[in-house]
Image (spheres, rainbow, N blue to C red):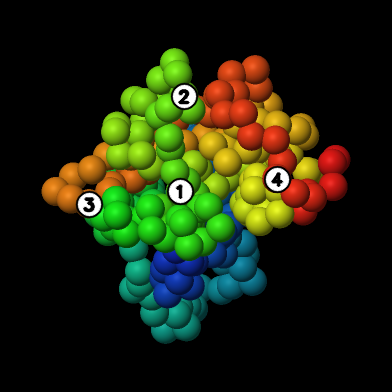
Amino acid sequence: MMLEILAATATGLVVLGWWMRRAALCPVAVGARPAGRRDATPRADGTVVLMAAPTDTATDTSSGEASGTQDTTARAAKKPPKRKPTGPSRRQFLKWGMGLGWLGVLAGFGTASLAFIWPNLRGGFGARIPVGTADSILGEIDSNQGRVEFPEARSLIVKYDPSLDPEDQYADITTGTGIMALYQKCVHLGCKVPWCAESQWWECPCHGSKYNRWGEWQEGPAPRGLDRFLVEEVDGQIVVDTSTVITGPSRSAAVLNQPPEGPHCQDAA
Ligand code: FES
Protein backbone atom coordinates (compact mmCIF):
# COMPACT_ATOMS: atom_id res chain seq x y z
CA MET A 1 0.00 0.00 0.00
CA MET A 2 2.81 2.36 0.84
CA LEU A 3 4.19 1.77 -2.64
CA GLU A 4 0.99 2.88 -4.31
CA ILE A 5 0.74 5.99 -2.13
CA LEU A 6 4.35 6.92 -2.86
CA ALA A 7 3.79 6.39 -6.59
CA ALA A 8 0.69 8.61 -6.52
CA THR A 9 2.50 11.32 -4.56
CA ALA A 10 5.47 11.22 -6.92
CA THR A 11 3.14 11.48 -9.93
CA GLY A 12 1.42 14.48 -8.37
CA LEU A 13 4.75 16.20 -7.70
CA VAL A 14 5.96 15.54 -11.25
CA VAL A 15 2.76 17.02 -12.68
CA LEU A 16 3.06 20.06 -10.41
CA GLY A 17 6.70 20.53 -11.42
CA TRP A 18 5.79 20.28 -15.08
CA TRP A 19 3.01 22.80 -14.64
CA MET A 20 5.26 25.27 -12.80
CA ARG A 21 7.83 25.09 -15.60
CA ARG A 22 5.16 25.48 -18.24
CA ALA A 23 3.63 28.48 -16.51
CA ALA A 24 7.08 29.99 -15.87
CA LEU A 25 6.18 30.57 -12.25
CA CYS A 26 9.07 31.72 -10.15
CA PRO A 27 9.22 32.71 -6.54
CA VAL A 28 9.69 36.38 -5.56
CA ALA A 29 11.64 37.16 -2.41
CA VAL A 30 9.55 38.57 0.41
CA GLY A 31 9.94 42.39 0.59
CA ALA A 32 11.38 42.70 -2.92
CA ARG A 33 9.88 45.56 -4.90
CA PRO A 34 9.16 44.87 -8.54
CA ALA A 35 11.04 47.10 -10.97
CA GLY A 36 9.30 50.37 -11.83
CA ARG A 37 7.07 50.37 -8.74
CA ARG A 38 6.66 53.81 -7.23
CA ASP A 39 6.69 54.74 -3.59
CA ALA A 40 3.46 55.82 -1.93
CA THR A 41 3.24 58.73 0.50
CA PRO A 42 0.16 59.04 2.75
CA ARG A 43 -1.38 62.51 2.92
CA ALA A 44 -2.88 64.14 5.99
CA ASP A 45 -6.39 63.47 4.68
CA GLY A 46 -5.68 59.75 4.41
CA THR A 47 -5.31 59.63 0.62
CA VAL A 48 -2.20 58.24 -0.96
CA VAL A 49 -0.11 59.86 -3.67
CA LEU A 50 2.05 57.69 -5.86
CA MET A 51 5.48 59.28 -6.21
CA ALA A 52 7.33 58.90 -9.47
CA ALA A 53 10.71 57.31 -9.21
CA PRO A 54 13.44 59.90 -9.48
CA THR A 55 14.96 60.19 -12.90
CA ASP A 56 17.33 62.63 -14.49
CA THR A 57 14.63 64.20 -16.57
CA ALA A 58 12.18 64.49 -13.68
CA THR A 59 14.67 66.42 -11.54
CA ASP A 60 15.56 68.81 -14.27
CA THR A 61 13.12 71.69 -13.65
CA SER A 62 15.12 74.35 -15.42
CA SER A 63 13.76 73.45 -18.85
CA GLY A 64 10.59 75.02 -20.18
CA GLU A 65 7.12 73.55 -20.59
CA ALA A 66 7.84 72.48 -24.17
CA SER A 67 10.91 70.64 -23.08
CA GLY A 68 8.87 68.87 -20.34
CA THR A 69 6.28 67.81 -22.91
CA GLN A 70 9.01 66.47 -25.16
CA ASP A 71 10.51 64.50 -22.27
CA THR A 72 7.16 63.03 -21.41
CA THR A 73 6.58 62.00 -25.01
CA ALA A 74 10.07 60.51 -25.24
CA ARG A 75 9.56 58.58 -22.01
CA ALA A 76 6.23 57.29 -23.22
CA ALA A 77 7.89 56.24 -26.47
CA LYS A 78 10.69 54.45 -24.55
CA LYS A 79 8.31 52.71 -22.18
CA PRO A 80 8.40 48.98 -22.88
CA PRO A 81 5.07 47.56 -23.95
CA LYS A 82 3.09 45.97 -21.17
CA ARG A 83 3.47 42.22 -21.21
CA LYS A 84 0.31 40.27 -21.24
CA PRO A 85 0.25 37.87 -18.27
CA THR A 86 0.80 34.30 -19.35
CA GLY A 87 -0.20 31.20 -17.42
CA PRO A 88 -2.55 30.99 -14.49
CA SER A 89 -2.94 33.45 -11.65
CA ARG A 90 -1.60 32.52 -8.25
CA ARG A 91 -5.12 31.68 -7.07
CA GLN A 92 -5.73 29.41 -10.05
CA PHE A 93 -2.41 27.73 -9.49
CA LEU A 94 -3.21 27.03 -5.83
CA LYS A 95 -6.66 25.72 -6.73
CA TRP A 96 -5.31 23.43 -9.40
CA GLY A 97 -2.45 22.30 -7.17
CA MET A 98 -4.89 21.32 -4.43
CA GLY A 99 -7.09 19.57 -6.97
CA LEU A 100 -4.13 17.59 -8.27
CA GLY A 101 -3.10 16.71 -4.71
CA TRP A 102 -6.55 15.33 -3.98
CA LEU A 103 -6.53 13.42 -7.24
CA GLY A 104 -3.20 11.86 -6.26
CA VAL A 105 -4.57 10.82 -2.87
CA LEU A 106 -7.69 9.33 -4.45
CA ALA A 107 -5.64 7.49 -7.06
CA GLY A 108 -3.37 6.04 -4.35
CA PHE A 109 -6.34 4.97 -2.27
CA GLY A 110 -8.06 3.36 -5.26
CA THR A 111 -4.92 1.50 -6.28
CA ALA A 112 -4.34 0.25 -2.75
CA SER A 113 -7.96 -0.92 -2.44
CA LEU A 114 -7.75 -2.75 -5.75
CA ALA A 115 -4.49 -4.41 -4.70
CA PHE A 116 -6.14 -5.49 -1.44
CA ILE A 117 -9.12 -7.20 -3.09
CA TRP A 118 -7.23 -8.40 -6.16
CA PRO A 119 -6.41 -11.90 -4.77
CA ASN A 120 -10.11 -12.53 -4.20
CA LEU A 121 -10.94 -11.32 -7.71
CA ARG A 122 -8.44 -13.54 -9.46
CA GLY A 123 -8.71 -16.52 -7.08
CA GLY A 124 -5.12 -16.44 -5.77
CA PHE A 125 -3.90 -16.52 -2.19
CA GLY A 126 -6.54 -14.87 -0.03
CA ALA A 127 -9.38 -16.65 -1.84
CA ARG A 128 -10.99 -20.10 -1.58
CA ILE A 129 -8.75 -22.22 -3.77
CA PRO A 130 -9.77 -25.61 -5.22
CA VAL A 131 -6.82 -27.99 -5.20
CA GLY A 132 -8.29 -31.21 -6.67
CA THR A 133 -10.39 -34.15 -5.63
CA ALA A 134 -9.83 -35.86 -2.29
CA ASP A 135 -8.72 -39.09 -4.01
CA SER A 136 -6.17 -37.33 -6.19
CA ILE A 137 -4.72 -35.40 -3.26
CA LEU A 138 -4.49 -38.42 -0.97
CA GLY A 139 -2.82 -40.34 -3.82
CA GLU A 140 -0.29 -37.54 -4.31
CA ILE A 141 0.46 -37.46 -0.59
CA ASP A 142 1.18 -41.21 -0.63
CA SER A 143 3.49 -40.96 -3.61
CA ASN A 144 5.22 -37.80 -2.38
CA GLN A 145 6.82 -38.78 0.92
CA GLY A 146 3.75 -38.05 3.04
CA ARG A 147 2.86 -34.53 1.96
CA VAL A 148 2.00 -32.37 -1.03
CA GLU A 149 2.58 -28.64 -1.46
CA PHE A 150 0.33 -26.13 -3.22
CA PRO A 151 2.32 -22.91 -3.76
CA GLU A 152 -0.73 -21.06 -5.13
CA ALA A 153 -2.49 -21.64 -1.80
CA ARG A 154 0.81 -21.35 0.16
CA SER A 155 -0.27 -24.59 1.74
CA LEU A 156 1.41 -27.75 2.93
CA ILE A 157 -1.12 -30.55 2.75
CA VAL A 158 -0.97 -33.74 4.83
CA LYS A 159 -3.30 -36.58 5.72
CA TYR A 160 -5.46 -36.19 8.78
CA ASP A 161 -6.46 -39.39 10.54
CA PRO A 162 -9.29 -38.62 13.03
CA SER A 163 -8.47 -41.78 15.03
CA LEU A 164 -5.20 -40.07 16.07
CA ASP A 165 -7.11 -37.02 17.33
CA PRO A 166 -9.37 -38.40 20.09
CA GLU A 167 -10.50 -34.96 21.25
CA ASP A 168 -11.32 -33.80 17.71
CA GLN A 169 -8.99 -30.83 18.00
CA TYR A 170 -8.74 -30.55 14.24
CA ALA A 171 -12.17 -31.86 13.24
CA ASP A 172 -13.52 -28.36 12.58
CA ILE A 173 -10.80 -27.36 10.15
CA THR A 174 -10.66 -30.66 8.24
CA THR A 175 -14.47 -31.10 7.97
CA GLY A 176 -14.37 -34.85 7.41
CA THR A 177 -12.13 -34.66 4.33
CA GLY A 178 -9.17 -36.48 5.91
CA ILE A 179 -6.96 -33.61 4.67
CA MET A 180 -5.19 -30.91 6.68
CA ALA A 181 -3.79 -27.70 5.15
CA LEU A 182 -0.91 -25.96 6.96
CA TYR A 183 0.28 -22.43 6.19
CA GLN A 184 3.82 -22.75 4.81
CA LYS A 185 5.07 -19.67 6.74
CA CYS A 186 7.10 -20.36 9.87
CA VAL A 187 5.41 -18.74 12.87
CA HIS A 188 8.78 -17.62 14.23
CA LEU A 189 9.90 -15.06 11.63
CA GLY A 190 8.07 -16.12 8.50
CA CYS A 191 10.50 -18.32 6.50
CA LYS A 192 9.00 -20.97 4.26
CA VAL A 193 9.21 -24.29 6.06
CA PRO A 194 10.37 -27.24 3.94
CA TRP A 195 9.67 -30.91 4.49
CA CYS A 196 12.46 -33.12 5.84
CA ALA A 197 12.10 -36.51 4.18
CA GLU A 198 14.37 -38.19 6.77
CA SER A 199 12.69 -37.06 9.97
CA GLN A 200 9.25 -36.70 8.32
CA TRP A 201 8.91 -33.37 10.08
CA TRP A 202 8.70 -29.80 8.85
CA GLU A 203 12.05 -28.14 9.64
CA CYS A 204 12.70 -24.44 9.27
CA PRO A 205 16.11 -23.58 7.75
CA CYS A 206 16.22 -20.09 9.29
CA HIS A 207 16.46 -20.76 13.02
CA GLY A 208 15.80 -24.47 13.30
CA SER A 209 12.19 -24.59 14.47
CA LYS A 210 10.72 -28.03 13.92
CA TYR A 211 7.12 -29.17 13.56
CA ASN A 212 5.70 -32.67 13.28
CA ARG A 213 3.66 -33.89 10.31
CA TRP A 214 0.56 -32.05 11.51
CA GLY A 215 2.55 -28.84 11.95
CA GLU A 216 2.64 -29.01 15.74
CA TRP A 217 5.63 -27.41 17.48
CA GLN A 218 8.39 -29.81 18.53
CA GLU A 219 11.62 -27.79 18.81
CA GLY A 220 13.15 -24.38 18.25
CA PRO A 221 12.21 -20.73 18.83
CA ALA A 222 8.76 -20.81 17.18
CA PRO A 223 6.11 -19.78 19.72
CA ARG A 224 3.47 -22.30 18.55
CA GLY A 225 2.57 -24.78 15.85
CA LEU A 226 2.13 -23.79 12.20
CA ASP A 227 -0.95 -21.77 11.32
CA ARG A 228 -3.48 -23.50 9.08
CA PHE A 229 -6.49 -23.14 6.78
CA LEU A 230 -9.99 -24.52 6.67
CA VAL A 231 -10.42 -27.42 4.24
CA GLU A 232 -13.81 -28.32 2.77
CA GLU A 233 -15.15 -30.49 0.01
CA VAL A 234 -17.32 -28.54 -2.44
CA ASP A 235 -18.86 -30.25 -5.48
CA GLY A 236 -16.31 -33.04 -5.31
CA GLN A 237 -13.37 -30.63 -5.06
CA ILE A 238 -11.19 -30.02 -2.03
CA VAL A 239 -11.15 -26.28 -1.36
CA VAL A 240 -8.54 -24.56 0.82
CA ASP A 241 -9.93 -21.34 2.27
CA THR A 242 -6.92 -19.02 2.42
CA SER A 243 -9.04 -15.97 3.26
CA THR A 244 -8.64 -16.71 6.97
CA VAL A 245 -5.44 -17.83 8.68
CA ILE A 246 -6.24 -20.05 11.66
CA THR A 247 -3.72 -19.66 14.47
CA GLY A 248 -1.69 -22.80 15.12
CA PRO A 249 -1.91 -24.83 18.35
CA SER A 250 0.11 -23.75 21.36
CA ARG A 251 3.35 -25.53 22.18
CA SER A 252 1.65 -27.64 24.83
CA ALA A 253 -1.35 -28.61 22.68
CA ALA A 254 0.32 -31.11 20.36
CA VAL A 255 -1.94 -34.07 19.59
CA LEU A 256 0.04 -36.23 17.19
CA ASN A 257 2.57 -38.53 18.79
CA GLN A 258 5.24 -38.63 16.11
CA PRO A 259 8.89 -38.84 17.11
CA PRO A 260 11.38 -38.03 14.34
CA GLU A 261 11.58 -40.95 11.89
CA GLY A 262 15.21 -40.29 10.91
CA PRO A 263 17.97 -37.70 11.19
CA HIS A 264 17.03 -34.05 11.12
CA CYS A 265 17.68 -31.83 8.10
CA GLN A 266 18.27 -28.68 10.16
CA ASP A 267 20.44 -28.15 13.20
CA ALA A 268 18.85 -26.89 16.37
CA ALA A 269 19.18 -23.10 16.78
S1 FES B 1 11.81 -18.29 10.88
FE1 FES B 1 11.57 -20.38 11.23
S2 FES B 1 12.70 -20.72 12.98
FE2 FES B 1 12.92 -18.63 12.67
Q: Which residue is mark 3?
A: 237
Q: Residue at x 63, y 42 (%)?
A: 186
Mark 1 Cβ and ligand 1 under 8 Å apart: no
- Viewer-nearest residue: 222 or 100: 222
Looking at numbered disc 3 in the image, what kind of residue is underneath it? Gln
Please tell me in which quadrant of the rendered image residue 163 appears. top left
Residue 187, percent from left and from top = 62, 36
- Image quarter hosting the C terminus: top right
Residue 47, percent from left and from top = 41, 34
Q: Which residue is mark 4?
A: 261
- Helix, strand or loop at mark 3: strand
Density class for disc 4 (Cα within 10 Å; few <14, some 14-19, many ≥20) is few
Q: Residue at x 57, y 29 (%)?
A: 256
* Alpha carbon separation for disc pair 1 and 3: 15 Å
Q: Are marks 4 and 3 in contact (CB under 8 Å)?
A: no
| Tally of numbered discs | 4
Looking at numbered disc 4 in the image, what kind of residue is underneath it? Glu
Mark 3 Cβ and ligand 1 under 8 Å apart: no
Residue 34, percent from left and from top = 55, 60
Tag in front: 3 or 2 = 2
Q: Which residue is mark 1?
A: 157
Looking at numbered disc 2 in the image, what kind of residue is underneath it? Asp
- Asked whether the viewer can see residue 105, the reply is yes
**Res 165 label:** 2
4 or 1: tag closer to the N-terminus: 1
1 or 2: tag closer to the N-terminus: 1
3 or 2: tag closer to the N-terminus: 2
Vertical placement of 169 versus 231: above or below?
Answer: above
Residue 129, percent from left and from top = 30, 51
* Alpha carbon separation for disc pair 2 and 4: 20 Å
* Alpha carbon separation for disc pair 3 and 2: 24 Å
- Helix, strand or loop at mark 2: loop
